[in-house]
Amino acid sequence: KAGVTQTPRYLIKTRGQQVTLSCSPISGHRSVSWYQQTPGQGLQFLFEYFSETQRNKGNFPGRFSGRQFSNSRSEMNVSTLELGDSALYLCASSLRTENTEAFFGQGTRLTVV
Amino acid sequence: GQNIDQPTEMTATEGAIVQINCTYQTSGFNGLFWYQQHAGEAPTFLSYNVLDGLEEKGRFSSFLSRSKGYSYLLLKELQMKDSASYLCAVKNYGQNFVFGPGTRLSVLP
């Protein structure tokens, strides 16, 4: 069974640009969550989707948005990039929303210059 | 809100036993998870506790006390490959995972 796939693995963007990251969950998993990981802040929750609906949202500005498609694949978008958005963006998929572990993808390393 | 605390760093010797503690304050508790993350890699699931007590999985065990808001991860017979960050995460009903800051474990020969 294939794991969680995130594309691209690495990305370099300049300030002010926008970026879209993609996540394909494990087959059969309907819950997808996104996290930002930085050395200083650790893993910070961005949002969670289940069956194309956003269930939870973290404390990030409106420049961060996401969506989930009918095949459970998810995308997140960051507009008007800032230097501070440089981070590892991790996607995790779960079979359900409760009582189940999350499986993480390898992440997308975003560098904003 | 939620608050999760873990020691920042720990060091242990190969073959030894190490206990990594995690304390949390939360409401609507629905499980505590431990993840391992090697540098530059994705976190991988280690264990899950939702009821009080000890869960054992090979060299790794995890303990939970809901009344005390306390968990620990016990690693036995440490190996060099166990050098990694260990993340404690709490799940509340209807809410997302909240991860602790992680404990960076260094295993020395």
Image (cartoon, grey):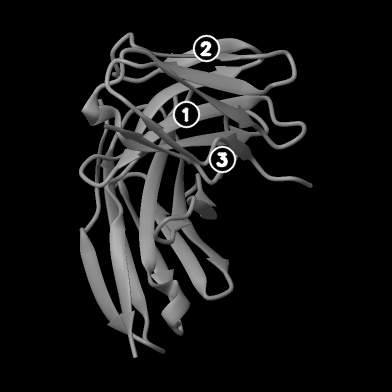
Does the CB distance between marks 1 and 3 fall below 8 Å? no
How busy is the neighbourhood of tag 1: few (under 14 within 10 Å), some, or many (20 plus)? many
| Alpha-carbon span between mark 1 and mark 3 | 11 Å
| Alpha-carbon span between mark 3 and mark 2 | 17 Å
- In the picture, which quadrant includes the C terminus of chain B? bottom left
Residue A39 placement (x, y as % from top left): 25, 47
* Type of the residue with mark 1: Trp
Mark 3 vs mark 2: which is more N-terminal? 2
In the image, which is nearer the foreground, mark 1 or mark 3?
Answer: 1
Which residue is at a point 35% across and 16% down the rendered structure image? A17
In the image, which is nearer the foreground, mark 2 or mark 1?
Answer: 1
Local SS, label 1? strand
Q: Chain of mark 3?
A: A
Q: Is any part of residue A99 visible from this angle? A: no
Which residue position holds label 1? A34
On screen, residue A63 above or below A14? above
Q: Is any part of residue A83 visible from this angle? A: yes
Does the CB distance between marks 2 and 1 fall below 8 Å? no
Which residue position holds label 3? A102
Residue B77 placement (x, y as % from top left): 46, 85
Towards the viewer: A14 or B44 = A14
Location of residue A104 by image quarter: top right
Which residue is at a point 25% across and 22% down the rendered structure image? A82
Towards the viewer: B45 or A87 = A87
